[in-house]
Image: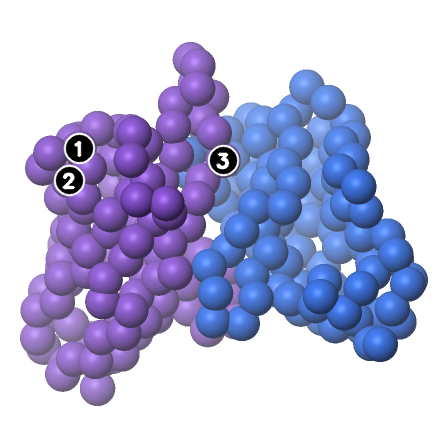
């Protein structure tokens, strides 16, 4: 596609429920990232995929959060037993490895606004 | 841990004036410094970036300066226009993929 696509754009869920957020990166981008943005704050890194593998998941807040990218393209962020504190905008971004250790700019999607009630 | 501080949190300028936003970072190994503009309800979009092997970069009305010794970098917007009004985020990275963002500056350009 022309840009990073995220679905749904909005998700309201009840506390304790399970949610899945989807990200479709720019075609050909091998690197994919998930960030979380709380109101009035900058994006906070969650996880980075290079191809199918999670190369760095150091930003995931706890084991309720999990992400997959089984075919190296689309990624799904999964949140179990949601809590009100999980409410935020979840941003996905993708980029391309230009040369050893250097990526192109990260292109962000519009985000999924998750509200846990 | 890695940290990026950004100032000011809000900035109001008259159209045509310049705006300067400053950031400091804690990780001395950081080597990539992008700036993103985010309009209300929209995605962050890269407006300019700089790598640690240069001290300054300019693109039309926008410029970024980097002082590695002091671990700070700044965004300069000249001849501001109302459409420059948005939230601006600085970020720092040692790896180009894991961006550590500042808390943002809300810029308002008054017509």
- The chain assigned the colour purple in the figure is A
User: In the rendered structure, which disc, 3 or 1, sits on the residue that comes first in sequence?
Assistant: 1
The colour with which the image depicts chain B is blue
Secondary structure at numbered mark 2:
loop
The colour style of the image is by chain
Quickly name the residue at label 1. A72
Quickly name the residue at label 3. A105
B10 w.r.t. B71: above or below: below
Return the x and y of residue B63 as percentages of the image width and height. Answer: 78, 41
CA separation in Å, label 3 and label 1: 19 Å
Q: Residues within 10 Å of mark 3 (few under 14, many from 20)?
A: some
| Residue drawn at 34 percent across, 48 percent down | A4
Q: Residues within 10 Å of mark 2 (few under 14, many from 20)?
A: some
Q: Quadrant of residue A13?
A: bottom left
Q: Quadrant of residue B64?
A: top right
| Residue drawn at 63 percent across, 46 percent down | B47
Question: Mark 1 falls within which chain?
Answer: A
| Residue drawn at 44 percent across, 44 percent down | A107
Quickly name the residue at label 2. A69
């Amino acid at each position: 596609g022309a840009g990073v696509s995220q679905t749904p754009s909005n998700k309201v869920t009840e506390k304790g429920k399970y949610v899945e957020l989807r990200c479709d990166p720019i075609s050909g981008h091998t690197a994919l990232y998930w960030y979380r943005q709380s109101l009035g704050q900058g994006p906070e890194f969650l996880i980075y995929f290079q191809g199918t593998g999670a190369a760095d998941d150091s930003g995931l807040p706890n084991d309720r959060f999990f992400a997959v990218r089984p075919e190296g393209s689309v990624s799904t962020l999964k949140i179990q037993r949601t809590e009100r504190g999980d409410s935020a905008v979840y941003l996905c971004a993708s980029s391309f490895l230009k040369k050893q250790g250097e990526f192109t700019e990260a292109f962000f999607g519009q985000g999924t606004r998750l509200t846990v009630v | 841990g890695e940290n990026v501080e950004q100032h000011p949190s809000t900035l109001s300028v008259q159209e045509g004036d310049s705006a300067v936003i400053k950031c400091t970072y804690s990780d001395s190994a950081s080597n990539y410094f992008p700036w993103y503009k985010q309009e209300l309800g929209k995605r962050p979009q890269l407006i300019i970036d700089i790598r640690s092997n240069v001290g300054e970069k300019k693109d039309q009305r926008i410029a970024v300066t980097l002082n590695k010794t002091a671990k700070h970098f700044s965004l300069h917007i000249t001849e501001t226009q109302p459409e420059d009004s948005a939230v601006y985020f600085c970020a720092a990275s040692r790896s180009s993929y894991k961006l550590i963002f500042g808390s943002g500056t809300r810029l308002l350009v008054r017509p």
